């Protein structure tokens, strides 16, 4: 039996109009995808317009800067376009697209690993004390930086679950793991994020 | 035996979807309550961190950049649109070839004699067919008269039935045993 004894930080969205909107969106996605598969390039523009913001933000969470996020988001759409012929609709288009974007980000980070480690060290050395009057933007930047230092699986889980509000099942599909693992990774990610920021004097 | 709540159970509790037993445990266990509190604090921090929103003009520019890059990418193809027609063509070919009257696809047991794929040509001296062609070929006079290649045909047309039979027999004996 499930209970809501503690206040849930995740809003449960059950309104029927939202379900209807989701259904319509999936239908529009399906139409655009089938058009792409018939060779209608312009149909892909509709998918780009619909998902560019989500993909960009996902990439930004990974790399923590606009320039790389822009490149990676474009790369994700290019990869999706090349592979759209293989899309069979086993999952929603957004889930499939996020998986491509996550893979693009992981490849990018793997290639920049050495540089990223140097960056983390320099930031850790130069971290200034954080007070309650800290600007929101600066605080956001520090949190994003801390998120980018989480272990890969924890970071991916946190980004997809918290910032993109996907279900545990969707995150599991994207990351190729089980729901139980997703929950455990998310719990570790949140605890580690708290510790990272506390260690830098952020909280 | 006293065991702490699993990470998965604690995550469920954090999301307000924990089992009664897990919630009860957290209320009584300092260790688990502390871990839950740290995760809740981490969640609060994570949710407060926004991604800087680019200018609205950026999205239009982004679409155009992606569009330009897509223009240089070959159109995606699916198995339905590429292999489908290929399979259909193959099926049609097989259907045509297996029509009984055509006898192009014969069962292995009924196959005819196997002919060599290639036979070395005979030399001019050894080839008996050349003398026959020589005899049938029009003379220079025939060509000058404008009869051209029709001269041989005309000559054949003038043969009697017996002469035609004799010529056919001569051709058969000359060509017997040769792979053409």
Image: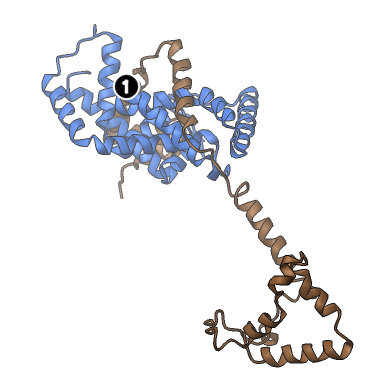
Chain colours: A blue, B brown
The residue to which callout 1 is attached is A67
Please tell me which residue is depicted at 69% across the width and 81% down the height of the picture.
Answer: B107
Which sits in the foreground, A67 or B14? A67
Please tell me which residue is depicted at 60% across the width and 49% down the height of the picture.
Answer: B82
Asked whether residue A163 is in view, the answer is no
Please tell me which residue is depicted at 53% across the width and 24% down the height of the picture.
Answer: A50
Q: Is residue B74 above or below residue B110?
A: above
Residue A63 x %, y %: 30, 27
Q: Residue furthest left?
A: A125
Q: Residue furthest right?
A: B161
At mark 1, the secondary structure is helix
Residue A169 x %, y %: 48, 40
Q: Is residue A107 above or below residue A43?
A: below
10 Å neighbourhood of mark 1: few (<14), some, or many (≥20)?
few
Which sits in the foreground, B152 or B75? B152
Q: Is residue A18 above or below residue B29?
A: above
Q: Quadrant of residue B94?
A: bottom right
The answer for which chain carries disc 1 is A
Q: Is residue A146 left or right of residue B122?
A: left
């Amino acid at each position: 039996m499930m209970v809501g004894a503690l206040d849930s930080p995740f809003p449960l969205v059950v309104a029927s109009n939202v379900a209807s909107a989701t259904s319509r969106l999936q239908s529009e996605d399906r139409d655009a995808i089938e058009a792409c598969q018939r060779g209608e390039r312009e149909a892909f523009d509709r998918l780009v317009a619909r998902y560019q913001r989500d993909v960009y933000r996902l990439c930004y969470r990974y790399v923590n800067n606009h320039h790389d996020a822009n490149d990676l988001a474009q790369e994700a759409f290019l990869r999706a376009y090349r592979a759209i012929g293989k899309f069979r609709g086993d999952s929603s288009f957004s889930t499939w697209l996020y998986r491509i974007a996550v893979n693009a980000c992981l490849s990018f980070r793997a290639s920049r690993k050495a540089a990223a480690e140097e960056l983390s060290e320099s930031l850790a050395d130069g971290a200034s004390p954080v007070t309650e009057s800290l600007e929101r933007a600066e605080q956001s930047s520090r949190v994003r930086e801390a998120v980018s230092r989480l272990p890969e699986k924890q970071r991916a889980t946190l980004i997809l679950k918290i910032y993109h509000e996907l279900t545990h099942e969707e995150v599991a599909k994207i990351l190729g793991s089980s729901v139980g693992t997703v929950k455990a990774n998310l719990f570790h990610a949140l605890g580690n994020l708290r510790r990272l920021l506390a260690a830098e004097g952020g909280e | 035996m006293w065991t702490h709540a699993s990470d998965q159970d604690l995550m469920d509790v954090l999301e307000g979807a924990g089992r009664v037993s897990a919630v009860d445990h957290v209320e009584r266990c300092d260790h688990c309550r502390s871990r839950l509190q740290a995760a809740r604090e981490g969640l609060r921090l994570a949710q407060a961190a926004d991604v800087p929103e680019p200018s609205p003009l950026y999205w239009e520019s982004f679409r155009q950049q992606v569009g330009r890059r897509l223009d240089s990418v070959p159109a995606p193809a699916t198995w339905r649109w590429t292999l489908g027609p290929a399979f259909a063509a193959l099926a049609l070919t097989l259907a045509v070839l297996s029509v009984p009257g055509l006898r192009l696809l014969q069962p292995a047991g009924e196959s005819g004699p196997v002919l060599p794929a290639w036979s070395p040509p005979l030399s001019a001296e050894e080839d008996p067919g050349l003398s026959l062609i020589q005899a049938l070929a029009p003379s220079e006079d025939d060509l000058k008269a404008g009869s051209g290649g029709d001269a041989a045909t005309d000559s054949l047309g003038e043969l009697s039935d017996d002469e035609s039979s004799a010529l056919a027999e001569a051709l058969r004996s000359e060509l017997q045993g040769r792979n053409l």
